[in-house]
């Protein structure tokens, strides 16, 4: 009865929802990257459940690229924040 509910579609949807909520709720950038990986896994799982295997293959190829772009963005944002914080501290000292 309850095992009928556990299939690829529901597990993938649950992973995608957990990843989405985690990205929104967690404040640390590294935690967001981990939740982004969960979101990607759920997304690819839902595509496979819909039997679009060619699209799933393309998504599986582009997902690591998207993760690398996200990491580069996080690094750049942290650098800009650090520079702004240092310039504000220098302005307060003068």
Image (cartoon, grey):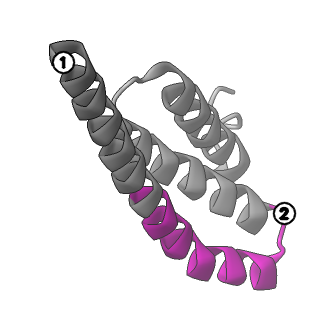
Q: Earlier in the sequence, mark 2 or mark 1?
A: 2
* Residue 53 % position (x, y): 76, 80
Residues at circles 2 and 1 in contact by the CB criterion of under 8 Å: no
Percent position of residue 76, x then y: 39, 54
Determine whether the residue tagged by mark 1 lies in a helix, strand or loop: loop
Is disc 1 surrounded by few (<14), some (14 to 19) or many (20+) residues within 10 Å?
few
From which residue to which does the magenta span run?
A: 50-71
Q: Residue 51 falls in which quadrant of the image?
A: bottom right
Q: Is residue 28 visible?
A: yes
- The spot of residue 87 in percent (x, y) is 28, 32
In the picture of the structure, the residue carrying the numbered disc 2 is: 50
Along the line of sight, which residue is nearer the eye, 10 or 55? 55
Q: Residue furthest front?
A: 94
Name the residue at 33% across, 30% down. Answer: 28
Q: Nearer the viewer, residue 91 or 43?
A: 91
Q: Secondary structure at mark 2?
A: loop
The spot of residue 52 in percent (x, y) is 83, 75
Q: Is residue 34 above or below residue 3?
A: below
Magenta segment main secondary structure: helix
Q: From the viewer's perspective, is residue 30 above or below residue 84?
A: below
The image quadrant that residue 66 belongs to is bottom right
């Amino acid at each position: 009865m309850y095992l009928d509910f556990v299939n690829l579609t529901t597990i993938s949807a649950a992973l995608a929802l957990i990843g989405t909520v985690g990205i929104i709720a967690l404040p640390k950038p590294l935690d967001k990257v981990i939740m982004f990986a969960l979101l990607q896994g759920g997304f690819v799982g839902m595509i496979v459940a819909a039997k679009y295997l060619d699209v799933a293959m393309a998504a599986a190829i582009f997902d690591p690229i998207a993760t690398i772009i996200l990491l580069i963005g996080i690094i750049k944002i942290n650098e800009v924040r650090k520079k702004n914080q240092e310039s504000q501290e220098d302005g307060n000292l003068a």
